[in-house]
Amino acid sequence: MISDTLKEPLPFVLPMQRAWYTRFAKRAMDLCGSALGLLLLWPLFLGVAIIIKRDSPGPVFFRGPRMGLGGRVFNILKFRTMHEEAASYVGPKVTAAGDARITPLGKLLRNTKLNELPQLWNVLVGEMSLVGPRPEDPEFAAQWPEDARREILSVRPGITSPASISYHDEEKQLSRDNLMGDYLEKIAPDKLRLDRLYVRHHNLMTDLDAIFWTLIVLVPRAARRPKSEGQLFGGPFTRLVRPYMNWTVIDFVLALFGMGAVGLVWRMFEPLDIGWNWAIWIGLGMAALFSLFNTLLGLKRVEWSRAAPEDVVGIFLSAGFVVIASMLVDMFISEFTVPNGYIIAAGAVVSVAFVIARYRLRLLTGLATRWVGLRGAGFGTGERVLVIGAGAGGEIITWLLRRSDFKRLFTVYGYVDDDPSKQGMRYDGVPVLGTTADLPALVEREDIGLVVYAIDRIQTGDRERILATCRQTEARLVILSDILQSFQAHFAPVNGRKDE
C-alpha cells in the first residue's frame, strides 16, 4: 500500500527548458509508435493473455503505482508474471533471479521483456513515453534527493531508457540474500545517475538510439556484450545520422550549385555540348560522389566550429578523389566526353565552397595557425592525455598542450564527455572517445598517462563522482582550476608593476 502522503503529487517540478518542436516531436513519436504497436501487436497480446489465464489463476494484467510526470502517481500496466497470492504482494518490491513468486511463464515473459508491452497503452494516454527514465515505485522515489526528484520527474517516464538497457539483466545482478541492500546501494544510485544524464541530454536521436539498443539487447548473444555509456548515449543515430544528415544536404546543394556555376562560365569560353538531361545527371552524380568521399574521410564527424586547421586537408583530398573518380567514370561513357578541365575546375570550386561553408570566419585564423605549426621542429609524440570535458575548458587544455613548450611532452589523445551529441565527434582535431563512466577502461586500453579534468560548470555530486573515478585509475590527475591558479600566480604583476 502507498502511504497517504504519496498519493498526492510531489512539490512542483521544474520543467526542462526544451524547445517546443523537440517536445512536439517526442510526443508525436510516442503517439505514432504506441498506436502502431498496439495495432500490430494485438494478436500477440491476445495470445499471451490466453496463455497467462491457462498457466495460473489470476488477472492477465498487473497494475502497480508508479511516479509520473510532475510527481503524479499512475498505474503502470504489465502482463502478470507472479502468482496471484498474498506472498506476491507483501514480499520485496524488486525481484532477483529464482524468485519463487514468479511463475514459469512469468520468467519467460520477463526474460523476453514481453511483460512490458502493455505499457504502450500508458504511452498512448500520455502517462508514459516510449523513452524516458523508468517509472519508479513511489516509496523508492520518495527517497531520492530533492534535486534528483525534481529533475527526473520533469519528463514522462519511459518504457525503455539508457539505464534500463544497462541493467537489462538486473535480476541476475541481485543476490537473494541481500536483495534490497544490493538494489539500494549498488544499482539504484547508478540508475539514478544515468536517468539524470538522459534528462539533461535527451533529444529525438538519443531516443531512437535507446529504442535501437533495446531491440539489440533482446537478442541473447548481443545482450551478453557489454555496452559502454558512450555507446548508450551516443548510439548509431546520434553518432551517424545527426551529424551526417545536416552535412549531406549542405554538401549536396553546394556541389550541385558549384558545378552548375562552373558549367555556365565554361560555356562562355568553350563548348560543353552534353545536353541538359545529361548535365543534370552529371551534376547529381558528382554531388553524390562529393558526399560519399566526405563521409568516408570522416569530414561529417568534425565539429567545424572547433575544427583543427589540418582538417581542411581532408576537404581538398575529397575533391581530388572526386575528380579522379569522375574522370574514370567518364572514360566508360561513349555518348559524349566531359572535358577534364571542367571536372578539375568543378572540383576546385566545390572544394573551396566546402571550406568556406565549414570554416567561414575561422578560415584565415586556421591557416595562420597551421603555418605556425609547420614552422615548429616536428610533432610531439609524448605522454597520452585524456581530457575530461569537450567544452571551453577542454579547448583551453588542448590549446595549451599543443604549444611548443608542451607538444613534445604530451599528446592530447581524446576527450570524454557525457553529452550524447558529442559522442564520436572531433573537437580541435581530437575525438570524443566515450563518457566519464568509460574512463577506467579507456585509461587501461589506450595507455593514458595523464587525465585532465576540464569541466568548469557542474553539480558538486557529479564532480566528486568523476574525480573519484579518475583517482581509481593509474593515470595522473590534473584539475583545470589548479592549472589556472598556476597561470595566475606566474603572470601576476610583480611589486604592483604591470607590463607596458
Image: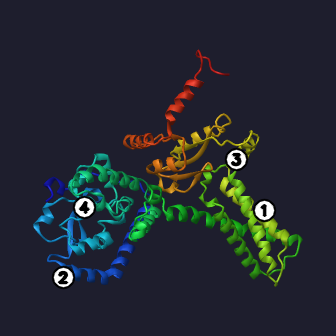
Left or right of residue 156: residue 204 = right
Which residue is found at the position 16% from the left and 77% from the top? Answer: 56
Between the C-alphas of marks 1 and 3, the distance is 19 Å
Mark 2 or 3: in front is: 2
For this orientation, the residue located farthest to the top is 495
Report the front residue among 185 and 369. Answer: 185
Left or right of residue 189: residue 310 = right
Residue to which mark 2 is pinned:
54
Residue to which mark 4 is pinned:
96
Mark 4 or 1: in front is: 4
Mark earlier in primary sequence (4, 1)? 4
Q: Are marks 2 and 3 in contact (CB under 8 Å)?
A: no
Between the C-alphas of marks 4 and 1, the distance is 64 Å
Three-letter amino acid code at the position of disc 2: Arg
Residue to which mark 1 is pinned:
348
Between the C-alphas of marks 2 and 1, the distance is 73 Å
Residue 241 in the image, given as x and y percentages of width and height: 54, 65
For this orientation, the residue located farthest to the right is 269
Rate crowding at label 1 as few (under 14), some (14 to 19) or many (20 or more) other CA atoms within 10 Å. Answer: some
Mark 1 secondary-structure assignment: helix
Mark earlier in primary sequence (2, 3)? 2
Residue 398 in the image, given as x and y percentages of width and height: 59, 42
Three-letter amino acid code at the position of disc 1: Ala
Q: Which mark is residue 366?
A: 3
Three-letter amino acid code at the position of disc 3: Gly
Mark earlier in primary sequence (3, 4)? 4
